[in-house]
Image (cartoon, rainbow, N blue to C red):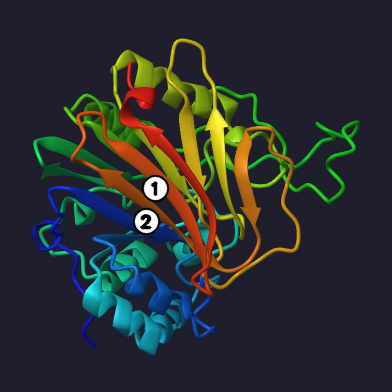
Amino acid sequence: MLFFSCKKDLVIFDDNTTRIAFGSCGSQNNDLPIFNVITDHNPDLFIFLGDNIYGDTEDMNVLRRKYNQLGIKASYQNMKKNVPIIATWDDHDYGWNDAGKYYKFKEESKEIFLDFFEEPLNSERRNHPGIYHSEIYSINNKKLQIILLDNRTFRSNLKSYNGEVDNDNRYNYSLDYGIINNPDSTLLGEQQWIWLEKELQKTSDIRLICSGTQFGIEYNGYEAWANFPYEQQKLLNLIKSTNANGVMFLTGDVHYAELSKLNEENLYPIYDFTSSGLSSTWDFSTPNSNRIKGPIMENQFGLLTINWEENNPEIIMEVWDVNNTLRFKHSILLSEISF
């Protein structure tokens, strides 16, 4: 079976406008018509942000079969024929719900993941633990960096919920996980942190950090960077210490779309653009005081458009649903996310 191979030299960006579609949480058991809608928008690139299938197994033959279910779908075939694809993972395609570094088949699932997305045999991703990766593209004398984080392979165990927000009546659902106040707990792991610092030191105008779990939301009792406040603050501090301009987050996981804006002292606003629900949806959204757009509860994808023609490029964030209806739009200028 032949799948689309997204090597860097196959991604061709127009000098004037870059259009990047992204999404997460699509079950191989659904038809996934959203891929046809994405293709109709003619993006330059599509980024899978995790839960690309729902594997949830310790049987690697089952995991391969579920990837194949996705790969042979007509809508997926249509998209991969017309749109370059790159990917990172979250828990369900990693192998098990909410799993971290102790998932015992993580090396096997990594190879299945990389083979499905036809990562070249000489790729750096095959030569280090985990699947983190980065590429820099030159466009009209500007540079665009795409950083794919791995928030599964090295992540410490989660902590069970212990009444952190019992007195807050916004939380009218059952919470799973608490806040980990142990500075030794990690989400990315030492090796990935060293790599990420070097990546943020590279010259780039816009940096899209892609994470399977949300970065810029407040604590909600489910999986998010907010469960690891030391790790979240470490990344904010790293952006500051490296003077990394143009950082934005693309995230998934929660089965709805929203745009969050995180304000941090001595740093420009950090936007977290979440699209989750290629086929999976929830009937409620969690509290998020950082939310400025959304939530959109129907099946949808995110579309990021960058206008490079201007000296101060405009960055447009849109969510389109499965009926090809624009659900929200928010625009910023590059200068707004620069030191």
Q: Of all residues shown, which one is farthest toward the top?
A: 266
Taking depth in this image into account, of 95 and 240 the one nearest to the observer is 240
| Nearer-N-terminus badge (2/1) | 2
Residue 202 locus on image (x, y percent): 18, 28
Q: Is residue 153 above or below residue 48?
A: above
The residue indicated by pointer 2 is 88
Q: Is residue 44 above or below residue 314?
A: below
Residue 211 in sight in this render? no
In the picture provided, is 177 more to the left or to the right than 7? right
In the picture provided, is 279 more to the left or to the right than 339? right
Mark 2 against mark 1, which lies toward the viewer?
2
Taking depth in this image into account, of 183 and 251 the one nearest to the observer is 251
The N terminus appears in which quarter of the rendering?
A: bottom left
Residue 240 locus on image (x, y percent): 37, 16
The C terminus appears in which quarter of the rendering?
A: top left
Residue 113 locus on image (x, y percent): 34, 67
The residue indicated by pointer 1 is 150
- Three-letter code for the amino acid on which mark 2 is drawn: Thr
In the picture provided, is 181 more to the left or to the right than 143? right
